[in-house]
Image (cartoon, helix red, strand yellow):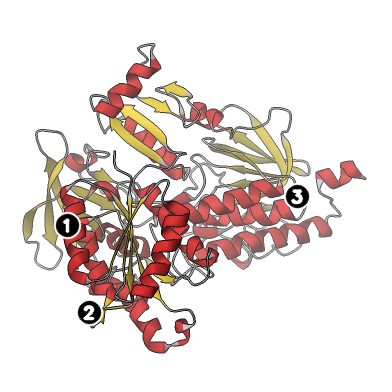
Amino acid sequence: MPAPVLFAIDEDERALHDVERELVDRYSRSYRVVCVSSVEEAMVELVALKAAGEDVALVLAAQSLGGKPGSELLGKVRDLHAHAQRGLLIEWGSWGDGQTAEEIFQAMARRQIEYYVIRPSQSPDELFHQSVSTFLLEWAHARRVSPHTVRIISESWTGRAHELKEVLGRCAVPHAFLLADSPAGSALVAESGNGEPLPLVVFPNGTVLANPTNLELASAAGATIDPDRREYDVVIVGGGPAGLSAAVYAASEGFRTLVVDDGGVGGQATSSSLIRNYLGFPRGVSGRRLAESAYEQAWVFGAKFAFMHDATAIRREGDRLHLALSDGGEVSARAVILATGATYSRLGVPELEALVGAGVFYSGPASEAPTTVDEEVYVVGGANSAGQAALHLAEYARRVTLVVRAESLDQGMSHYLVRQVEATPNIDVRPGTEVVGGGGGADGWLERLVLRSRADGATETVEAEELFLMIGARPNTDWLPGELARGEGGFIRTGTDVESDGSWPLERSPLSLETSMPGVFAAGDVRQGSMNRVASAVGEGSIAIKLVHELFAAEQLHPLDRVRQA
């Protein structure tokens, strides 16, 4: 198989030479470098590469080409090479130029580029290589060629195979799906050698699990509870942004910390393919990448993680809180943080529920987007996550239709996202519309949807090959005891809310994120009044640990490991 291509175009011969030098010196062992100096030559080469079936991993283009913005050429690249990353080459220091900044912002809004790259100068130029390496990592994840990709092999997309994909997706684990009768799939089945039942899960280290349970997946990934350590200072239920933030701050400040989640890390944030407005990430960050980084950070500080474990009950015995888990075990702590988030509501259309995993997905498109090239794709939802999903899918699909119950996007979506959606030519918006039916073809995959206007009830049947449902949310609180007060919709009440409604049992006032069960805190989307943003969830996670410090100080408690050291 030919090596993937790194492609660069710049009319400035000297600048192009510098780019070519850096690319060849650093990447020529694994990639083929192609550099051209005109738009015409670039288009001829890119068309030829597509015709030859070659992978283009990265295209870099000068800011100005043939008197036009280089972003225009990069915008055409997606039609030829759907998975290619695209960077706009700019001069060092030009970010201080308002016009350049506006060009970059507009090009990103129109999804013509992923980000900019500062032209290399001296060799080696590590700033240039940092940008290129980031592009190539994103390309590797999109193409499922990451060296740490887990592979699922099954006879169909549905059933347990789809559940395994969802589990690994919630764990932010790179994974790929292969049909058992495909060349690659049949080869992996043959390598297992024992006629194991499908689906198979093949790990990068060679471990093969046949139709594993969620707990078996967790064990293979090394994320189960240490049977010799069942007492903690803080147990965090939920591994989304709020839970991960709490884990980082708790572990870094000396608390013995355990994170329990029925899936893995990231929570609903892993469905966000690109979060553009998160502080400190100017080129944006995927929910998966943010979760991976936060997990690593917490793990290095000493936090323990138990994935694929449900918390099933919570009770107080003396001065400790006890959590029952789905594996039959139990852990205890002096403080518990509930960061269980919320899950998308179900559509409730039987013929579409039967196609979950076969073109119908209750999640964002981070995993499925690369498979939607040249397809008609629909996204249902009017909040930020739906807008992010539509923009990500627009990089691959022929057309994306965003179906919104509200009369306008402005009612539930951030202004910057509305601008991006409206500026993307292959995204249509259907306000005041809902999905009421649909069905699959002979191959068992989604092929049509029935849309209904909320204004006059008129229906329309449309072709559709993928449907991503991101409608509403309900908190994951069904397992909690009745004494833990909840408000409208089941969201957890905290602070002054539980004091004013009479559910607070102590003489002291509750701390701001404390629930009606003393020592139990709530953070993130599960909490009544939360802002439903990644940044606010992260903030609440850190605040929860500050409040745990206050609780320990008020009750003259000390972290377990600090007591043992003393």
185 lies above or below 337: above
Q: Residues within 10 Å of mark 3 (few under 14, many from 20)?
A: many
Between disc 3 and disc 1, the foreground one is 1
Badge 2 element: loop
Badge 3 element: loop
Task: Please report whichever mark, 3 or 2, sits nearer to the chain's N-terminal start.
Answer: 2
Q: Residues within 10 Å of mark 2 (few under 14, many from 20)?
A: few
Q: Residue furthest top?
A: 194
Task: Please report whichever mark, 1 or 2, sits nearer to the chain's N-terminal start.
Answer: 1
The image shows residue 196 at horizontal and vertical percentages of 37, 15
Q: Considering the image in quadrants, where does the C terminus appear?
A: top right
Hey, what amino acid is under mark 1?
Answer: Val
Hey, what amino acid is under mark 3?
Answer: Phe
The image shows residue 292 at horizontal and vertical percentages of 53, 50
Q: On residue 255, which mark appears?
A: 3
Per the image, the residue denoted by label 1 is 47
Q: On residue 66, which mark appears?
A: 2
Q: Looking at the image, can residue 168 be seen?
A: yes
Q: Residue at x 20, y 59 (%)?
A: 45
Residue 174 versus residue 467: which sits nearer the camera? 174
* Distance CA(mark 1)–CA(mark 2): 19 Å
Between disc 3 and disc 2, the foreground one is 2
Q: Residue at x 22, y 79 (%)?
A: 66
